[in-house]
Image (cartoon, rainbow, N blue to C red):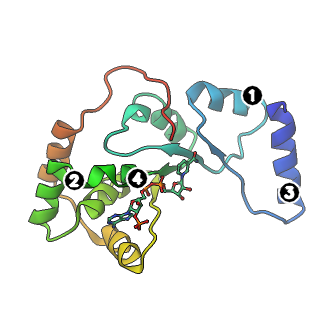
Amino acid sequence: VPLAETVEAMEQLVEAGLIARWGVSNLDTDDMGELFDAGGEACATNQILYNLTRRGPEFDLLPWLKRCSIPVMAYSPVEQGRLLDRRALIEIAERHTASPAQVALAWLLHRDGILPIPKAGTVEHVRDNRAAADLVLTPDDLNELDRRFLKPTRRRPLEML
Ligand SMILES: NC(=O)c1ccc[n+]([C@@H]2O[C@H](COP(=O)([O-])OP(=O)(O)OC[C@H]3O[C@@H](n4cnc5c(N)ncnc54)[C@H](OP(=O)(O)O)[C@@H]3O)[C@@H](O)[C@H]2O)c1
């Protein structure tokens, strides 16, 4: 289906009052350019794989979205649980009497325009994740995370799960 037709259909749903906004998922920088060329400037968000072990989007996609004031929904923010036994997260969590999941989520929440969407199947995990919004990481914590989970130095294709 041509993107322009999809955009038109989304806008019709907005006009009909059936949805408030619409967004996209797994679109890389060039795809976002195509979306805009197809009239999709009203896109409200791009939902992408983004967490401490998936920092590729920082190279060009996140700056592109920021320039266009489009917030990011970061899916699989704890890498489907695989991030939780990483030593750096455990050590920082211990310093704050927090959990590794909270540190991974707080790192995302500290970043402008990033909204992590963790999946939790228990009330305990929902409460744990909610408390991540109150965890304030220090500049030392953030520097340590940058050392242990490196920023991208070149463009990489967007990863997906
Ligand atoms: N757009 C896309 O292509 C795409 C692709 C993948 C996922 N998503 C969306 O992204 C969201 C989440 O992603 P995801 O489920 O792939 O990965 P995730 O949120 O990174 O990880 C979920 C896993 O982490 C565990 N967990 C969550 N909070 C925890 C905590 N505080 N302590 C310990 N373990 C915790 C969960 O266990 P329990 O279940 O036991 O709580 C579950 O096993 C979902 O809404 C999903 O639909 C979108």
Which residue position is annotated with label 1?
37
Amino acid of disc 4: Gln
Instruction: Say whether mark 3 is within 8 Å of ligand 1.
Output: no
Amino acid of disc 3: Leu
Tell me how far mark 2 sits from mark 1, CA to CA. 43 Å
Q: Quadrant of the N terminus?
A: top right
Label 4–label 3 contact, CB within 8 A: no
Q: Along the polypeptide, which appears first: circle 2 or circle 3?
A: 3
Give residue 122's position: percent from left, percent from top. Answer: 42, 75
Q: Residues within 10 Å of mark 3 (few under 14, many from 20)?
A: some
Label placed on residue 85: 2
Give residue 41's position: percent from left, percent from top. Answer: 71, 40
Give residue 82's position: percent from left, percent from top. Answer: 32, 50
Amino acid of disc 2: Asp
Which residue position is annotated with label 3?
13
Question: Is 49 left or right of 39, judged from the image as shown?
Answer: left
